[in-house]
């Protein structure tokens, strides 16, 4: 079992109300057999629902 942690900070303001979505991000290689991922917000206010998409 291998666990990879990543953290990010996104701050939205009235002047910058959106977070630009980039291209697809690939974590690991096909041979790594990643079976789970999660998205957790430690703090959020006045935002709409987010989503996470997968592809192979």
Image: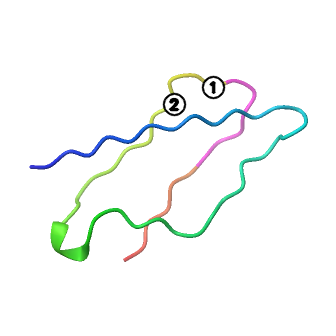
Residue at image position (52%, 69%) is 24
Q: Residue 10 at x, y = what percent?
A: 63, 37
Q: Main secondary structure of the magenta part?
A: loop
The quarter of the picture where residue 54 lies is bottom left
The crowd level at tag 1 (other Cα within 10 Å; few <14, some 14-19, many 20+) is few
Q: Is residue 41 magenta?
A: no
Q: Which residue matches tag 1?
A: 44
The boundaries of the magenta stretch are 45-50
12 lies left or right of 53: right
Q: Residue 14 at x, y = what percent?
A: 89, 32
Q: Is residue 49 magenta?
A: yes
Q: Secondary structure at mark 1?
A: loop
- The residue positioned farthest toward the left in the image shown: 1
Residue at image position (65%, 42%) is 49
Q: Secondary structure at mark 2?
A: loop
Looking at the picture, tell me which residue is in the foreground, 49 or 17: 17
Q: How many marks?
A: 2
Q: Residue 19 at x, y = what percent?
A: 72, 48
21 lies left or right of 31: right
Tag 2 and tag 1, C-beta contact below 8 Å: yes
Residue at image position (57%, 22%) is 43
In three-dimensional space, the C-alpha distance between marks 2 and 1, rounded to whole angstroms, equals: 7 Å
The crowd level at tag 2 (other Cα within 10 Å; few <14, some 14-19, many 20+) is few
Screen quadrant of the C terminus: bottom left
- In this rendering, the answer to whether 23 lies above or below 9 is below
51 lies left or right of 7: right
Q: Which residue matches tag 2?
A: 41
Which numbered circle lies on residue 27?
Answer: none
Residue at image position (51%, 55%) is 52
């Amino acid at each position: 079992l291998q666990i990879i942690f990543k953290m990010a900070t996104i701050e939205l303001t009235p002047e910058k109300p959106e977070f630009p979505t980039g291209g697809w991000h690939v974590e690991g290689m096909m041979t790594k057999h990643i079976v789970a991922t999660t998205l957790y917000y430690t703090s959020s206010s006045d935002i709409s629902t987010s989503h996470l998409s997968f592809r192979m």
